Structure formats: C-alpha cells, structure tokens
Amino acid sequence: MTDLFIPAMPVIRQEFAASAIQVQATMFGVMISFGFGQLLWGALSDRFGRRPILLWGLALFFVSGIWGAITQQMETLLLTRVLQGAALGASVVCARAMVRDLYEVRDGAQVLARGLSGLGLFAIASPLFGGFLTDIFGWRSNQFAIASVGMMCLLMVWWFVPETLYHRNAKATQWPSLWRNYKKILSHSEFLSWSLVAMSTYGGLFLILSGGPFVFLQVLEVSASTFGAVIAAGSLSYLLGTLVCRRWIARYGLLGTVRLASWISLLIAVTAVIFVLFQMQSFFFTLCLQMLYGLAHGFHQPCSNAAAPGRFPEMAGTASSLMGMLMAFAAVATGLYLSTSLDQGMDGYLWGIGFWGFLLVIAVRMVLPRMVLADEKVQ
C-alpha cells in the first residue's frame, strides 16, 4: 500500500502547499507507527490469538483510509497515515506469528518467500495503478483504493482465515511477564543477529521509498507515471528475488542464502559510492541500482523475518514485534538522515544506500557466522 501512495506525494504537496518535510512525514509516520505499533499487537496476539488482532487491525486500516481520503488538512492526513501504519503493523506481526505457529523455521522461511512473491505482484501493480489514479482522478482516489483493499482483506480473513494459536498465554500482556519475555528475546544472540540483517535491508528499503520521490521527481525530473514504473521495476526485481530465494533456502539453508545474496548487497554499496565519487546522475543507472536492491531484499527479508523469531514459538507474536521495533529504529535513523541530506541532491541518497549495503554485508558476513546456534540447526 506504500507503493500505491508514493506517486501521489508531489500532488499532495501542491494541494496543501506543504513543505517537502511535511510530505515526507506521511511516509515517515507510517514506518514509525508500523514498527512501534507491533510491540502492542505482538503481545495482544499472544494473549488473545492471531485472528481477532488481525481483524481489528484491518478494520482500523479501512477506517483510516477513508478518513485520509476525505480530510481537508495536511495535519489530519498525517494522522491518518500514522494510523494506517499502526494498523498495517497488526497485519504483519500476526502474519509472521501465524507462519511460526504452523511451520518450523526453514519451512517458514520458504512459506514467507512464497507469500512475499504474491506481495511482489501487488507491489508491481500498485505504483503503476497509483500513478494512473493520481493522474486521472487525483490523490484522494489513492486513499479510497487503499481503504478498499483493507476492506477486501478484512472480509477474506473473516471468511477464510482460521485461528492458528491454540495455546494462548493469559499473562502475555501483564507487564512482569512481558518484561521477562523482552529480556529473554533481546539477550538471544541469534535473534539479535538476524534482526540486524532485517534492520539493514529494511533501512535501505525505507531510504529508497522515502528518498526516491525526491531523487526521481525533482533531481531527475521524471513524471509521476514514470516514477510509478520505476517503483514497479524495483518490485519486479524483488519478486524475482523471492522466487529464487525459495529454491536457495531448500538447497543452501537460511545462512547460505543470505551469504550468497550479500554479494549483491556489496555490489550495490560499492556502486553507490562510485556514483557519488564520479558525480553520476543517470536515470538508467539509478534505476538499475534500485532494482538490484529490490533483488537482494527478496532474499534477505524472508530469511531474516523467519529466523529472528524462530527460536521463540511460545511467544512468536512478541518476538516478531520486537524485531519490528528494531526495524523501526532503522527507519527513524534513515528518516532523520534524509531530512538533513536531501539538500545535497543525489549524493546524500546514494551515501545512504551505500551505508545500508555495507552494514548488511557486515551483518551477514561477520555477525551471523558467530551465532550461538548454526543456521543448519534451525529446523
């Protein structure tokens, strides 16, 4: 749904006479509430089950989408976007936890990769559709479309998705128990190692989604529809990554898969630095860079998202939410960086991609091999 909204950002800025920072905050607010909201949803899903929390989250997503479509104030639009992010957090944390309820870690990673392949198809169509809606009907149509998707998902979950948590933890939301669970999870080296991978790949993705509109629409001066095609191209490469990831997991395991994919991340980081040093501002090469990032993300995301909470099946919701919070820290850091670096034009954007690429390589090549338990034992 983020991809559907992005092509409308320049039009929103014009209609509300908003600053670039205010418009960027509509993305930043979603990512922050998405990450930190998971702390609430995770514990609630361990206490009350996955299905009711998923339904409440989708209902909030629908309502916030309608509210955002009819608002006449920039501040209210920002509030609705924050609510959308929080609601989206419920869907993601419950989905991860449901996969852990039903599958062991390696099988769960393959299931996540399969599901993310389907998500990749939506990610391909969303920016193209979003650009079309913005050009023909205006930005409010994007919000109505987002709300419609929320309602369709709500009805599908209501009719077709059963509960997967059969042993609920009545103490999951009690502070003493919750604090003990947090300490147990955050002291586990394997969880922290995989979470660093998740943070690194997510930080770079957030930078591309938040900084991309500025780079392509203002620096490279492409149209909203063309930028929608740029996002779709990145989503297509992400889809390819998830498809190959499923085969690599079966052959090489989780650790072997991300180690192979880290070569792509290294290429991205080195290329970004070269672009800065030689002052290259090419639409084609920048597009290729983003497509490579989408490809690598298709490997790193499902592996890290399945492995990080994998050691805690009895509190999968809480573990998944903590990983989401750590990913939110990456989004916060990236957002703060972008707020001060976009004045440098493409240089700040490329330095950011280089940073997250190198950090991802370090996480995979230096941190993960030192895990307490080897990946091959994560079954």
Image (tube, rainbow, N blue to C red):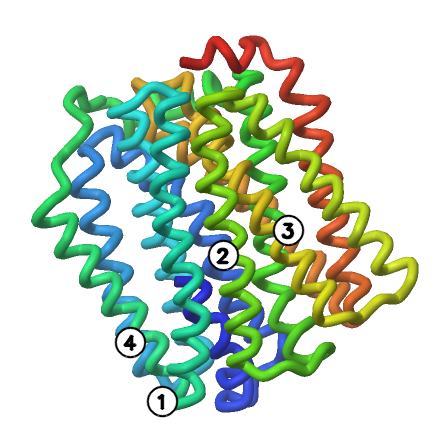
Point out residue 272 in the picture as x, y percentages from the top left corner. Answer: 78, 54
Q: Which residue is mark 1?
A: 137
Q: Amino acid at mark 1?
A: Phe
Q: Nearer the viewer, mark 1 or mark 2?
A: 2
In the rendered image, the quadrant that contains the N terminus is bottom left
Q: Which residue is mark 4?
A: 144
Point out residue 23 in the picture as x, y percentages from the top left corner. Answer: 55, 75
Point out residue 15 in the picture as x, y percentages from the top left corner. Answer: 49, 90
Quadrant housing residue 78: bottom left
Q: Which residue is mark 3?
A: 292
Tell me if label 2 and label 3 are in contact, CB under 8 Å.
Answer: no
Task: Name the residue rendered at 51%, 80% in the picture.
Answer: 225
Q: Amino acid at mark 2?
A: Leu
Q: Residues within 10 Å of mark 4 (few under 14, many from 20)?
A: some
- The CA distance from mark 3 to mark 1 is 32 Å
Q: Amino acid at mark 3?
A: Leu
Point out residue 226 in the picture as x, y percentages from the top left corner. Answer: 56, 78
Work out whether mark 2 precedes mark 3 in sequence or the reverse, and give the earlier one: 2
Is residue 275 depicted above or below 297 in this figure?
Answer: below
